[in-house]
Amino acid sequence: MERILNWGLLSTAKINRALIKPLNASKRTRLLAVASRNISSAEAYAREWKIPRAHGSYEALLNDPEIDVIYNSLPNHLHAEWTIKALRAGKHVLCEKPFAVSLKEVDAMIAASKETGKVLAEAFMYRHHEQTIKVKEIVDSGELGTLQLIKGAFSFKLEREGNYRWMTEMGGGSIWDVGCYPISYARTIVGAEPVDVFGWQVTGEGGSDEVFVGQMRFKNDIHMQFDSSFRCPHRSYLEIVGSKGVLKISNPFKPGKTNTVQLIQEDKEKTINIRGGELYMGEVDDMCDAVLQGKSPRVSLADSRNNTAVILALLESAKSGKLVIV
């Protein structure tokens, strides 16, 4: 019998809600504790979600000897600092995307994981879902022919004033928050890194991009175009174009238990039904496999570093108005 891993939530962020259900459902995990910057907030959250322990500081959670795994859902600019502290406190860490907002931070996180021998993985939940795995299989099978073009978008209207996503100094911006998904998806489908990128952005009062439009060029004449936004209505799609067909994914980044993708070949359209599981269960299971069985996480640290590098290159391009080699 595998032992049960005790998990702790580092913050009371809204995204925690997505992970609480799979943590409670898994037979290999126990959601044991939550931490906030003050005890009253932590206790209120613990009561609401029936979490046994509440810690009034992040340090207190890291010092809890019974915690095995930390879920780091802090704002983007705090990911590196608290992930490194958690690793050095002897905890495994599932860090919410984006992994970090500089390559210096990413390298420090990777170094801390290697030094401590603790598992570290980025929480890109879509990567574990059956739909993503099936799409990758279709592309790799050659059914679409030679890969030529990928198009994607992820946008929503951010209404919350004062939210950290508006602030550059807090790692804000639509490309970090939602643009990272089509970027990651394209890299996964191609199975390689882009050669160069070009980007445009519309910035807001907080300095971060409210709208980002980007292009990525891969070897073998494969191109990718995407946009992300906090201003546009909700949009989420991906289109993969090959020499023999087109694959359309209407819900690529948050697929559910029943999913369909459209395969178009020679004006004939075929609907492919894909049964999936709980969206966030995959990353929980993946973390358990890595900690308990020594398996490599599906989202490798090299993958996370490369995705960060592409985002930074796109931001550099948007600021300079020039093509940037990755």
Image (tube, rainbow, N blue to C red):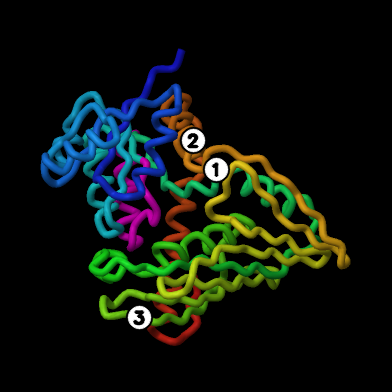
Q: Which residue is mark 2?
A: 286
Q: Which residue is mark 1?
A: 128
12 is higher (above) or lower (below) than 146:
above
Displayed quadrant of residue 277: top right
Residue 306 is left or right of residue 246, and the answer is: left
Q: Which residue is mark 3?
A: 203
Residue 150 is left or right of residue 283, and the answer is: right
Which tag, 3 or 2, sits closer to the chain's start? 3
Q: Is residue 82 magenta?
A: no
Q: CA distance from mark 3 to mark 2?
A: 36 Å
Q: Are marks 1 and 2 in contact (CB under 8 Å)?
A: yes
**In the displayed image of the protein, which residue is found farthest to the bottom?**
321
42 is higher (above) or lower (below) than 202:
above
At x 64%, y 72%, the residue is: 223
Which tag, 1 or 2, sits closer to the chain's start? 1
- Say which of marks 3 and 2 sits in front: 3
Looking at numbered disc 2 in the image, what kind of residue is underneath it? Asp
State the extent of the magenta-drawn residues as a range.
94-117
Seen from the viewer's position, the closer of residues 104 and 46 is: 46
Residue 47 is left or right of residue 172, and the answer is: left
Instruction: Name the element at disc 3.
Output: strand
Seen from the viewer's position, the closer of residues 195 and 238 is: 238
Q: Position of residue 188 (x, y in %)?
A: 59, 55
At x 30%, y 70%, the residue is: 166
